[in-house]
Image: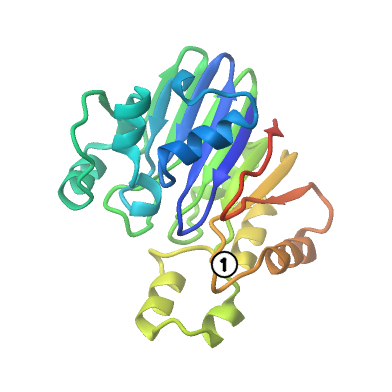
Amino acid sequence: MIAISLQSGSNGNCIYVETDGIRLLFDAGICGAGAASRLNRYGRDIREVDALIISHEHTDHIRYAGVYQRKYGLPIHITPKTFYKAETENKLGKLSKVNYFLAGGTIQFGGVTIQTIPTPHDGVDGAAFIISSAGKKLGILTDLGHVFQELFPVISSLDAVFIESNYDPGMLANGRYPAFLKKRIQGPNGHLSNSEAAELLQAGAKLKWACLAHLSENNNTPQLALKTHSGILGSRFPFYVAGRHMPSGILAV
């Protein structure tokens, strides 16, 4: 199993996963040409992707979903509530290949199983994902809202994970965001801080690596995120950072 974060952050999110002959994209927050170009760097053709799976309706995750389908022929997998919300708010355009899943259910592609996990993030029906294939498990855990109890057994089962490490509390508190936005980010429907993500990862006894994702441009830095995680977890496994403007490179599980 391999994975590539094509981009991560409030400016757009998209993760590529390839395993057991199946090619998947999770979220479509970057333009189609950008996703295609970044995949091409690693010898992958976006037209050969088997499905686009959407986590929730926020524009940084779904903005270009219609383009991915119309230009590249990708079937979209999405919850009914998320699709309806996106259709009414984001104007995805004409779609012909839409497949529905329920948050908490599974999606199957040959020998690849995707377990979906409902999240308390402030989307209408958000989901995180566990991709299982050939005895390996990869988590895509971003836009979580807060650390909820069901995440601990999930983390303990994973071989690798993309996990949101959105903000540093000190930077957020002293930054220029208005009070209502700071409250939303720190609240139960917002995002995980660096320390919250690191403390959650302590449950990851099987983890081979963790890629820190969805870092805030204004309330975090890659260096600070890595320092916080290393301070809590030491050198138990390697850490990577999913960039806001560039792909992560190929990460193998």
Along the line of sight, which residue is nearer the eye, 198 or 165?
Answer: 165
Residue depicted at 58% across the width and 24% down the height: 44
Where is 125 relative to 18, above or below? below
**Left or right of 157, for residue 32:** left
Give how far across and how far down residue 116 sits, in percent: 42, 36
Asked where in the image residue 127 lies, by quadrant, the reply is top left
* Residue 216 image-quadrant placement: bottom right
Above or below residue 145? Residue 151 is above
**Location of residue 149 in the rendering, given as x and y in whole percent from the top left corner:** 50, 53
Q: Which residue position holds label 1?
A: 193
Q: Is residue 154 visible?
A: no
Which quadrant would the C terminus be assigned to in this image?
top right
Q: Residues within 10 Å of mark 1 (few under 14, many from 20)?
A: many
The answer to whether residue 128 is above or below residue 198 is above
Image x and y of residue 243, in percent: 61, 53
Which residue type does callout 1 highlight?
A: Ser
Residue 238 visible, this orientation: yes
Q: Is residue 38 left or right of residue 120?
A: right
Which residue ends up furthest to the right in the rendered image?
235
Residue at the image point whose x is 20% and y is 38% from the top = 93
Left or right of residue 231, residue 12 in this image = left
Give the residue at x 39% y 53%: 60
| Residue ranking furthest to the left | 88
Q: Is 131 in front, or is 203?
A: 131
Give the number of callouts.
1
Query: Which residue appears at 29% of the width and 36% of the height?
Result: 66
